[in-house]
Structure formats: structure tokens, C-alpha cells
Amino acid sequence: MGGTLRFGGVDGVELLQVLGEAADAVAGSLDGLTDWGLAGTRPGQYRSDLVADAAAVRVLTEAGLGVLSEESGFSAGASERALLAVLDPVDGSTNASRHIPWFATSICVLDESGPLVALVVNQATGARYEAVRGGGARRDGEAITPSLKESLGRSLIGLSGYPPRYLGWRQYRALGAAALDLCAVADGTLDGYIDCMRDAHGSWDYLGGLLVCAEAGAVVADAAGRELVVRDHSGRRTPVAAGTSALLSELLAARATWRR
């Protein structure tokens, strides 16, 4: 199979099946893992990242997709493929290593126009978020929509990192896995999300959640106003998301009050 796409043309349903097989392969690789600690390969890389990456990349490349992975970079021949799967095999690796049930496999397939199909699977609970461009977003097969909160002072906000001052939220949560945090905005669990660090997230962290948000009706932007679709391993962004444009504007304005 390795040289050609196993599905005829570009079919969202068939692509989702492939992404589901990759996520299932990750789950299988983690089932037998006994050492969830740091791998000693590079800072912040865990043994779970390595075994999960190998399992997911194998499925994706055998289906004919190019792969850009946080853990292993570009797969062989990725630049020659029409479709690129941007992969984070274990988003929230620290959570996983400490048995905190908020870590995920996130995969977003890009075509020449941008995000096409996405799957984000909470590997601790099995919850699956999926989206196809123009086809809406679902959690475990059910359509999802974001909350309609427009005011920061009435909102529950997810944080990555922590801001230098109180931003005026009603409540906040720091959950530790950007892909799932964005999906939580998409289904209304969170009203918004703000990355309080600077350029800490690669495209594998947020592209899956970005498409789920977009198809659910939520909005996502980079804090510095840059394009979020990044196709290289070194690119980093600062994502901010909300269920409504009004709340997103408040979050971006709050984020702009410090340089970090």
C-alpha cells in the first residue's frame, strides 16, 4: 500500500477510518507500556511518545499519507504526498505519565487548502472528536456546538501556562493537553481557551482541535495574528479560542496586555 492512497480520491469518511486505525494503534501500544517516564532522548520526550509515534506513523504511511509528527518529524517522501497528516501521538504526555486522564492522540490531515479531516481521541477515556471540512464536528458520533458566552467575566476559560495577572474570567482550568482543551471549547465544556505562553505550541498540538472548533462553530486565532496552518516542524504559534467571536476578541485583547 505504501506508495498510493488506499482510498479512492479524497473521502472524509475513509480518511477518518484511517485516522481511527492510527489512534487505535496508539491505544494498543500504550496498553502494554510499563515505563511511562522520560525517554532520555530529548527534553520533555516520554517513552509513551516514542511507542505511540511508531504505531501511528506505521498506519498512516501504509495508507499512503505523508506524516509530520511532533516526535519523528516528516516521514520519508512526505513532500510528495497530496495529503499530510499532522500528528501528535500523545498530546499531554506529562498527564499520561502521571495517570491524569486528559491526554490524547491528535491527527489533522491537510490538503492544499488547509485542514481537511481531524480526529482527536482522549486515550484515557476513549472520547473521540472528529471533523471533516464542511461536514460539521462530532463527539462520539453526536454533533457538537460551543457555548454562547460572550463575556469573559461570565466564562470558564482553559489556560495553557498562567498569565502574569488575573484576566477577569469567572473561573479557569489548566488541563494540560491543547488538543483536548480546544475540543472542550468546541463542545461547550469550556467557553474559551488562552495560551499564556509565547509560541509554545507546534501545529500538531492544535490543528486537530482547530478543525473541530471551526466545524462546531467556535473560533480560533493566533495571539499575534499569524496564520495557524504551519507545515514545518519548527513553526510555533500561540492559539486562543472561544465559542463566540465576542469572547475571542476579549481574550485576544487580554492576551495582548503582556508580551510573554
Image (spheres, rainbow, N blue to C red):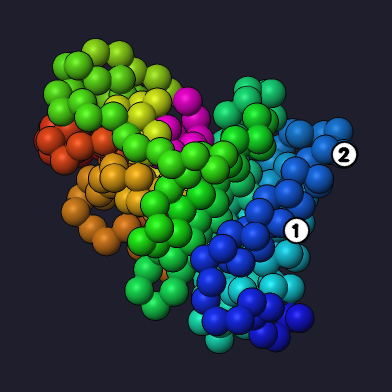
Query: Quick one: quadrant of the N terminus?
Result: bottom right
Task: Please state which of residues 79 and 9 is positioned toward the viewer in this rendering.
Answer: 9
Side of 19 relative to 62 (left or right): left
Residue 47 seen: no
Residue 169 is covered by the magenta coloring? no
In x, y percent, where is residue 209? 43, 47
Q: Which residue is mark 1?
A: 54
Residue in the image at 64% along x and 50% along y? 89
Residues rendered magenta in the picture: 175-184
Mark 2 surroundings: few (<14), some (14-19) or many (≥20) residues within 10 A: few
Classify residue 244 by image quadrant: top left
In x, y percent, where is residue 114? 37, 68
Which label sits on residue 118? none
199 versus 233 height, above or below: above
In space, the residues marked 1 and 2 are separated at their CA atoms by 14 Å
Side of 163 relative to 255 (left or right): right
Instruction: Specify the farthest residue to the top.
Output: 170
Q: Secondary structure at mark 1?
A: helix
Query: Quick one: quadrant of the C terminus?
Result: top left
Q: Which residue is mark 2?
A: 32
Side of 259 relative to 92 (left or right): left
- Assign the magenta stretch its main secondary structure: helix
Q: Given the image, on which type of amino acid does mark 1 rest?
A: Ala
